[in-house]
């Protein structure tokens, strides 16, 4: 029987045991927001949790319950979006991280699945160290799950640069590979979404520019990118590359932490 890695399915005694084993704990951060007419609103939450689960199995980590709400202000004009303000979101993730550190975990990974959460998570990771390292010796890493494997995934893409934004090729392929029953590709007929300058995996100029948010009254479909070329086969390949890269990154980070102690 495969050992359980999800904390919500473990008893307090089992969690105590993994803390004593000095295992990494992953905090997946997702969102509840519109993802076009073809995908469920828990897409980001599901993907962050799914990658966390696969990663935990590979490296012997455990996964804290996924944070289901994130910074989703971009799509709050669309039905189904439930957004937290940035300060409240950061406080929530901070409190979760602080609880895990005080519980005894010494290695935390905040694994993001919703792009706007990313910079907020970086600040939370910094704050955890600033506030707690006088009394606790721990390491915290913040990364979005698609970042370490971005180059490999970029080589496999079918869409133009800008096609892997929000509810585009990457996310739609991911959902087709893992939950095809929840994807309604037929509802994309006639939908032409804009490409974006913040493509998830393409090499981009490192700048963040924010403009007026999309609105359904203007005919926007809550999609940035190209979901039309998405396939389950691509999704399986994207997921494999994502997890492989995450395994390499975390193995190297954990090794450097052990050397530092």
Image: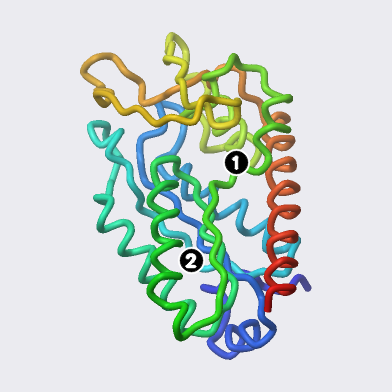
Residue at the spot of label 1: 146
Q: CA distance from mark 2 to mark 1?
A: 20 Å
**Residue 120, image x and y in percent?**
38, 51
**Residue 254, image x and y in percent?**
70, 66
Indicate whether 255 appears above or below 228.
below
Residue at the spot of label 2: 65
Q: Quadrant of the N terminus?
A: bottom right
Judged by depth in the image, the label closer to the viewer, 2 or 1, is: 1
Circle 2 crowding by C-alpha within 10 Å: few under 14, some 14–19, many from 20: some
Q: Is residue 92 left or right of residue 161?
A: left
**Residue 51, image x and y in percent?**
62, 51
**Contact flag, marks 2 and 1 (Cβ < 8 Å):** no
- What SS does tag 1 mark? loop
Instruction: Give the mark count.
Output: 2
Name the residue: 48% across, 78% down: 101
Quadrant position of residue 127: bottom left
Quadrant position of residue 193: top left
Indicate whether 163 appears above or below 245.
above
Pick whichever, 101 or 224, lies toward us. Answer: 101
Name the residue: 39% across, 41% down: 116
């Amino acid at each position: 029987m495969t050992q359980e890695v999800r904390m919500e399915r473990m008893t307090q005694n089992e969690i105590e045991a993994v803390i004593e084993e000095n295992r990494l704990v992953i905090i997946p951060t997702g969102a509840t927001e519109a993802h076009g007419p073809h995908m469920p609103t828990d897409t980001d939450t599901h993907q962050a949790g799914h990658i966390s689960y696969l990663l935990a199995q590979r490296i012997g980590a455990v996964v804290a319950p996924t944070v289901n709400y994130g910074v989703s202000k971009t799509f709050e004009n669309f039905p189904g979006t439930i957004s937290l303000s940035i300060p409240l979101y950061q406080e929530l993730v901070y409190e979760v991280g602080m609880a895990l550190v005080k519980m005894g975990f010494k290695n935390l990974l905040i694994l993001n699945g919703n792009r706007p959460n990313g910079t907020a998570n970086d600040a939370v990771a910094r704050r955890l160290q600033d506030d707690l390292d006088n009394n606790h010796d721990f390491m915290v890493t913040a990364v979005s799950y698609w970042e370490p494997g971005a180059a490999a995934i970029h080589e496999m893409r079918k869409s133009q640069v800008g096609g892997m934004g929000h509810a585009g090729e990457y996310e739609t392929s991911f959902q087709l590979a893992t939950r095809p029953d929840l994807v309604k590709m037929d509802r994309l007929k006639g939908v032409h979404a804009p490409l974006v300058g913040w493509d998830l995996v393409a090499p981009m100029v490192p700048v963040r520019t924010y403009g007026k948010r999309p609105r359904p009254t203007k005919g926007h479909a809550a999609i940035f990118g190209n979901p039309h070329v998405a396939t389950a086969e691509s999704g399986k390949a994207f997921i494999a590359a994502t997890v492989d890269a995450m395994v390499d990154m975390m193995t190297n980070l954990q090794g450097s932490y052990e050397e530092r102690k």
